[in-house]
Image (cartoon, rainbow, N blue to C red):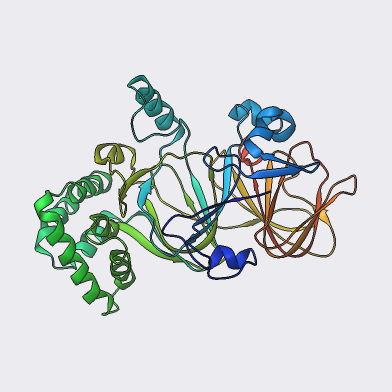
């Protein structure tokens, strides 16, 4: 495959170039390595000496490429997008709709001229596997903890928000607090953010129970000065994923990636509603409608897959995708999963994929290939690590 590099401003000048064995630093920021058939950046696939976009390859023969079960369920569309994410700066605080919300909202938007925050009618759950320690904001704190974090700043302008958090149920109070922060009168925004950042800088040095979250505010302010998302970020759980751990971002779960390098697997959608740390539109009413404070963003423990290989699967509720990690040995073992559309990414060492007819594809770090459903009986060998993205059907359908 020929992946697409997205050069967003928040990207790294080192991580993707180092992964692919290129000179560092890169000429500009490199944020995401895309592997898939998404129309905003379809990968190239070379077959018989000819390179074409994966989206064209899939549309030409969907059952051959995806398999009948995948086509029946997803309408002939590759349901996932695999990425390597390299964040040197914080991404926006954001949330994604579930399938019904996306379908309904996109339909209404299309009927009203097409302008609006939805780019398609698909959900966008995500799974992030940390290749390096990865700092994230993921899911809401409890109501009482959020109140304590904000109250601990000693900022007078936050007292009404703290009062909201100290009354009502968790979900109602947290939604009200988020709305109150994001809908601050224009004249109050700059002084409120300034006081919160100053207080966060002081508390980050005191090494209290929330020092890392306060420190994240100081870090994010360097890239998003004056942004109300800096204040709203304190409503969210702050954590640092250790390398080798994974986090699942379900629909309705508010989150932000702060910094780190990881493998990200998601449904093939662009539907994003932002809450801050961005220069793009923040549609507060729609954000609050989609956000569900009750949604937790869990760490996903890998489960060993039965068989001769050293493969683990990161199971999550998403029907669009499943992520597998295989530690390679010199002895060839069956590629997992064995069918459906698969994208194989090498992150370490060397991997050799061997077809039943003897054809071999060799992958080095940062290289990937697409394995269609029609290629059955593929084995993999080598010394290193590969990640395989597949549809979630094998895990979630009876």
Name the residue furthest front: 27
Name the residue furthest bottom: 206
Residue 260's x, y, as percent? 47, 65
Q: Nearer the viewer, residue 375 or 144?
A: 375
Q: Quadrant of the C terminus?
A: top right
The residue under the point 40% across, 50% down is 296
The residue under the point 29% across, 36% down is 286
Image-quadrant location for residue 309: bottom right
**Residue 345 in the figure: left or right of residue 93:** right
Whether residue 398 is visible, yes or no, is no
Residue 324's x, y, as percent? 65, 53
The residue under the point 21% across, 67% down is 197
The image shows residue 279, relative to residue 349, as above or below, that is above
The residue under the point 50% across, 59% down is 30
The image shows residue 71, relative to residue 215, as above or below, that is above
Whether residue 318 is visible, yes or no, is yes
**Residue 205 in the figure: left or right of residue 323:** left
Q: Nearer the viewer, residue 130 or 21?
A: 21
Residue 317's x, y, as percent? 53, 43
Residue 95's x, y, as percent? 38, 45
Image-quadrant location for residue 394: top right
Q: Nearer the viewer, residue 300 or 281?
A: 281
Image-quadrant location for residue 145: bottom left
Name the residue furthest top: 111
């Amino acid at each position: 495959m020929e992946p697409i590099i997205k050069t967003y401003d928040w990207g790294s000048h080192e991580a993707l170039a180092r992964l692919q064995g290129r000179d560092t630093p890169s000429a500009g920021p490199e944020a995401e390595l895309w592997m898939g058939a998404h129309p905003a950046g379809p990968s190239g696939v070379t077959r018989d000496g000819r390179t074409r976009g994966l989206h064209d390859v899939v549309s030409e023969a969907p059952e051959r490429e995806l398999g009948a079960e995948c086509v029946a369920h997803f309408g002939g569309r590759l349901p996932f997008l695999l990425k390597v994410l390299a964040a040197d700066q914080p991404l926006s605080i954001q949330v994604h709709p579930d399938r019904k919300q996306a379908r309904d909202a996109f339909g209404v938007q299309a009927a009203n001229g097409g302008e609006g925050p939805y780019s398609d009618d698909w959900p966008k759950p995500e799974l992030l596997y940390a290749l390096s320690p990865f700092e994230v904001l993921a899911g809401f704190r409890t109501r009482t903890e959020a109140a304590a974090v904000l109250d601990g700043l000693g900022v007078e302008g936050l007292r009404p928000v703290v009062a909201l958090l100290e009354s009502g149920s968790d979900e109602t109070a947290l939604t009200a607090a988020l709305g109150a922060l994001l809908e601050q009168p224009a004249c109050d925004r700059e002084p409120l953010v300034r006081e919160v950042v100053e207080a966060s800088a002081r508390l980050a040095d005191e090494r209290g129970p929330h020092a890392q979250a306060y420190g994240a505010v100081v870090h994010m302010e360097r890239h998003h000065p004056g942004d109300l998302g800096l204040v709203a970020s304190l409503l969210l759980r702050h954590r640092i994923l250790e390398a080798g751990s994974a986090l699942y971002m379900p629909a309705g779960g508010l989150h932000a990636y702060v910094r780190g390098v990881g493998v990200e697997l998601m449904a093939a959608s662009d539907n994003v509603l932002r809450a801050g740390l961005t220069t793009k539109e923040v549609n507060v009413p729609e954000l609050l409608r989609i956000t569900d404070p009750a949604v937790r963003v869990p760490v996903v423990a890998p489960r060993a897959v039965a068989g001769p290989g050293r493969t683990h699967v990161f199971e999550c509720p998403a029907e669009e995708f499943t992520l597998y990690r295989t530690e390679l040995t010199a002895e060839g073992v069956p590629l997992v999963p064995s069918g459906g559309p698969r994208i194989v990414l090498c992150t370490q060492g060397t991997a050799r994929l061997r077809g039943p007819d003897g054809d071999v594809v060799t992958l080095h770090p940062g290289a990937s290939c697409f394995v269609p459903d029609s290629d059955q009986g593929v084995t993999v060998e080598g010394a290193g690590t590969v990640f395989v993205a597949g549809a979630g059907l094998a895990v979630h359908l009876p």
